Image: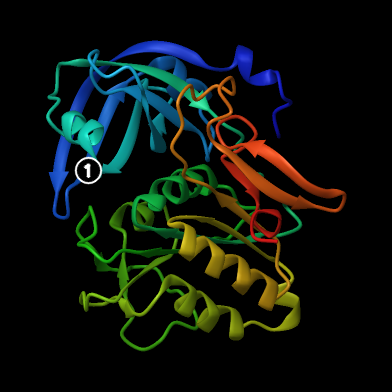
Amino acid sequence: MKQTDRSHRDTIFLEQAEILEHQAFEGDQYIFKLRAPECARTALPGSFAHIQVDPALPLRRPISIMRTSPTDGWVEFLYKVVGNGTRILAGRRAGESLSILAPIGTPFELHPEHPAPLLIGGGVGMPPMVFLAQNLAGDNRFHPLVILGSEVPFPFRPQPSRILAPAMPDGVIASMPLLDDWGIPSRLTSLAGFPGCHQGYVTDLARFWLQSLNDEALAEVEIFSCGPHPMLEAVVRLAREFNLPCQVSLEEYMACGIGGCAGCVVPLGTGSGQEMKRVCVDGPVFDGRQVFS
């Protein structure tokens, strides 16, 4: 359910979260797990956390949530080092603690009338897709397909999928093992020549699959996506090409993260004209057609 302008005030928690694990991967990518029971209990796919990487840095960093365990009280994140803040975060170790504001933002909305969600994630835009897939695992109303792309080595070891994904190009068998474990088919793309991956963009592989569907099957599809701005723009063009609904999660720099500073405002095209919306609390999930109108 979409939040109202004020509803976030009672749903964001400030926690001192212990780092349980912090793993480094190629391409300056890191996955870390925090003990944050309130966030784990209340986060929904599309939510993010505003994290204080160091007390000496006043501005927090927004990082998308990749996975949660409400039972065990932990939350998992993926990020890539892109500046001083994330470089400092990369140096934090298990046993240390971080101050986090979370969960923040409007989540993705699933619609049973579209039981074939197509999840498309690129780079550090993969976490919201993984979190949405976790939410879909075991839900018999939906039969999703996940397409993930990266131009640096993936922050996991790709494996040949054990799950059949119909209408895939020959040799495209690489998958994210975690999604296989959840029973959700996934396929990987890259221009870097990684074995088993589709050699192209995520939208190329998505188009190949969509073209294989008849009108009845196509009407069941809704696209969900997160990734770099040019990728999201291409995803929305794809959605228009096949006349599909499309939700996108935006990544923006922000200061307060709770809607007060309006530093993350983006223009949306609506039926009544252009409206300015805050990515932190009005988003980060928006109708893709309004973002790229």
The quadrant in which residue 244 appears is bottom right
Q: Residue at x 33, y 36 (%)?
A: 77
Towards the viewer: 287 or 224: 287
Q: How many marks?
A: 1
Query: In the displayed structure, would residue 150 be above or below residue 165?
Result: above
Asked if residue 108 shows in the view, the reply is: no
- Which x, y percent locates residue 289? 69, 59
Name which residue type carries label 1. Val
Q: Quadrant of the C terminus?
A: bottom right
- Which x, y percent locates residue 139? 58, 48
Asked if residue 281 shows in the view, the reply is: yes
Q: Quadrant of the N terminus?
A: top right
Query: In the displayed structure, would residue 260 be above or below residue 206?
Result: above
Residue designated by label 1: 81
Query: In the displayed structure, would residue 270 be above or below residue 10?
Result: below
Left of 127 or right of it: where is 104?
right
Left of 206 or right of it: where is 243?
right
The quadrant in which residue 36 appears is top left
Query: In the displayed structure, would residue 270 be above or below residue 118?
Result: above
Q: Residue at x 46, y 22 (%)?
A: 102
Q: Residue at x 44, y 55 (%)?
A: 227
Toward the bottom, the furthest residue is 170
Towards the viewer: 148 or 249: 249
The quadrant in which residue 58 appears is top left
Bin the neighbour count of mark 1 within 10 Å (Cα to Cα): few under 14, some 14-19, many 20 and up.
Answer: some
- Which x, y percent locates residue 140? 61, 52
- Which x, y percent locates residue 253? 43, 37
